[in-house]
Image: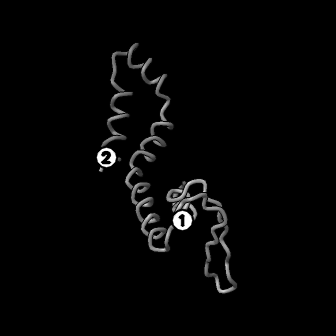
Amino acid sequence: MAGEINTLDAIQSLASGVEFRVKIATDGTETILFENLNGITEPTTDEIAAEVIRLQAAYDALNYSRTRKAQYDLLNQDEMRYDDLVNSTTTWRDGIAAIKVAHPKP
């Protein structure tokens, strides 16, 4: 899952392993056709909609973490730590702290 959570993500979360197809009508409406439920109850439209909301909230709640990781990846951390050791500085620690301040946990 990346970014926007959709109906397919929700179905996979609710009924992992179930075979289904999505039929899209000419007016753009989607119909989900379950083909092989393997004893699993077919999720309702309301359950699927609620799962989309739940999964999106879980994804959004970790945005700070994804943003921090992207910022950490921009740092040359090994070189910064070595330079700090040799020069008795705190550049690496300060850089990490600045990222955490800029992107705090909720």
Q: Which residue is mark 1?
A: 6
Q: Identify the residue shown where x is 38% and y is 15%.
A: 85
Q: Amino acid at mark 2?
A: Lys
Name the element at disc 1.
loop
Q: Mark 2, residues whose alpha carbon is within 10 Å: few (<14), some, or many (≥20)?
A: few
The one nearer the camera, 17 or 100, is: 17
Residue 16 lies, in percent from the top left, at 56, 54
Q: Quadrant of the N terminus?
A: bottom right
Q: Identify the residue shown where x is 67% and y is 77%.
A: 24
Extreme bottom residue here?
27
The one nearer the camera, 104 or 97, is: 104
Left or right side of 103 for 72:
right
- Disc 2 to disc 1, how far (Cα)? 25 Å
Q: Which residue is mark 2?
A: 105
Give the answer, above or below, for where 20 lies relative to 92: below
Q: Identify the residue shown where x is 47% and y is 65%.
A: 52
Extreme right residue here?
26
